[in-house]
Image (tube, rainbow, N blue to C red):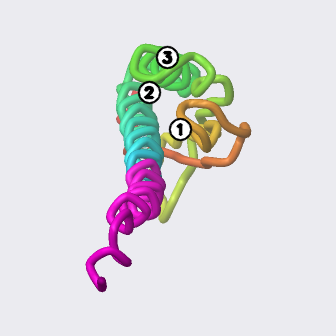
């Protein structure tokens, strides 16, 4: 008689556990997407800073290069707010490229301006 009391419990257990597993799986996928966007934008900003640091380029050229790289890698909406400037740290001229990108909260959609990322490079002498 004890066996009859357990009949159907496997179906209920599967329904409860599978719902939790789907939520955990979607959370891991979302985290991976956020890290991908973050790392891609940082890499594009660093490449733009290296480009702007060349002797015959300007900070504006670095910002343009960063926008092109982000647009081709992710989406043009991630390249809307790109700034480049020359700064001096301990007497060394640096090019800093800053990007304010939307936080991909649900897939590639999300509120704007949540990720503040930047790349740096030592500027060559003209």
Rendering coords of residue 100 (x, y %): 64, 39
Question: Is the residue under label 2 in contact with that under label 3 (CB below 8 Å)?
Answer: no
Write down the residue under mark 2: 52
| Crowd rating for badge 1 (residues with CA inside 10 Å; few <14, some 14–19, many 20+) | many
Judge left or right: residue 37 versus residue 6: right
Distance (Cα) linking label 2 and label 1: 9 Å
The residue tagged 1 is 97
The kind of secondary structure the magenta stretch mainly shows is helix
In the image, 27: left or right of 86? left
Residue 17: in sight, yes or no?
Answer: yes
Residue at far left of view: 3
Residue 14 or 60: which is nearer the viewer?
14
| Number of the front mark, 3 or 2 | 3
9 drawn magenta: yes
Q: Secondary structure at mark 3?
A: helix
Name the residue: 40% across, 63% down. Answer: 17
Q: In what element is the residue under mark 2? A: helix
Where does the magenta region start and end? 1-26
Q: Is residue 1 left or right of residue 57?
A: left
Q: Nearer the viewer, mark 2 or mark 1?
A: 1
Marking on residue 71: 3
- Please state which of residues 94 and 28 is positioned toward the viewer in this rendering: 28
Q: Residue at x 59, y 33 (%)?
A: 84
First in sequence: mark 2 vs mark 1: 2
- Farthest residue in the bottom direction? 2
Q: Look at 26% across and 78% down and name the residue there.
A: 3
């Amino acid at each position: 008689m004890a066996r009859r009391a357990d009949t159907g419990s496997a179906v209920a257990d599967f329904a409860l556990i599978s719902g939790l597993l789907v939520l955990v799986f979607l959370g891991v996928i979302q985290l991976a997407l956020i890290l991908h966007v973050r790392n891609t934008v940082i890499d594009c900003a660093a490449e733009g800073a290296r480009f702007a640091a060349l002797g015959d380029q300007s900070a504006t050229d670095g910002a343009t290069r960063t926008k092109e790289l982000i647009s081709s890698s992710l989406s043009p909406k991630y390249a809307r707010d790109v700034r480049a400037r020359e700064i001096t740290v301990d007497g060394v001229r640096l090019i800093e490229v800053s990007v304010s990108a939307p936080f991909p909260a649900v897939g590639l959609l999300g509120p704007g301006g949540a990720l503040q990322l930047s790349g740096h490079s030592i500027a060559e002498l003209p």
